[in-house]
Image: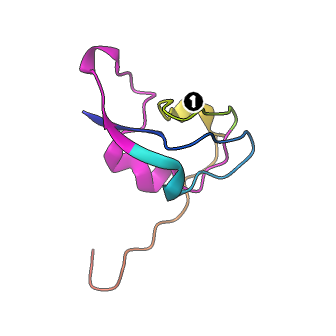
Amino acid sequence: MRGLVAARDIPVGGKLTAEDVTEQDMVLDTVTPSFVKEQEQPQAVGRTITAAFRKGDPILWTHFYNEPPPVVVPAKGTK
């Protein structure tokens, strides 16, 4: 499985951006539902961070404020 990890240090209170994350292969034995999967990136980007990430840390759903995900508008010509 591919999951998201921090591409750089990310401070508390910031909004996660696409540039803040990179995809990485994850060891399935260590993956829990709190890991943000690669395909979930559109729902994670734009959320406010409640715990700092260091470069290489896995991005976890538990480290975001419990707010609705940002609205993702599909590009023209896509569904």
- In terms of depth relative to the viewer, which is nearer, 63 or 23? 23
Q: Position of residue 63 (x, y in %)?
A: 61, 33
Q: Is residue 40 above or below residue 1?
A: below
- In terms of depth relative to the viewer, which is nearer, 77 or 11? 11
How packed mark 1 is, by other alpha carbons closer than 10 Å (few <14, some 14-19, many 20 or more), is some
Residue at the right extreme of this rendering: 13
Q: Quadrant of the C terminus?
A: bottom left
Q: Secondary structure at mark 1?
A: helix
Which residue is pictured at 42% across the width and 51% down the height?
41
- Which residue is tagged 1? 62
Q: Position of residue 39 (x, y in %)?
A: 32, 49
| Left or right of residue 28: residue 23 | right
Which residue is pictured at 52% across the width and 65% down the height?
71
Q: Quadrant of the N terminus?
A: top left
Kindly indicate the quadrant of the structure image that contains residue 31: top left
Which residue is pictured at 51% across the width and 32% down the height?
60
Which residue is pictured at 35% across the width and 43% down the height?
23
Q: Position of residue 11 (x, y in %)?
A: 71, 41
Residue at the bottom extreme of this rendering: 76
Q: Is residue 49 above or below residue 76?
A: above
**Image color mode:** rainbow
Any magenta on residue 79?
Answer: no
Magenta region: 23-49
Kindly indicate the quadrant of the structure image that contains residue 27: top left
Amino acid marked by disc 1: Thr
- In terms of depth relative to the viewer, which is nearer, 43 or 19? 19
Q: Is residue 3 above or below residue 68?
A: above
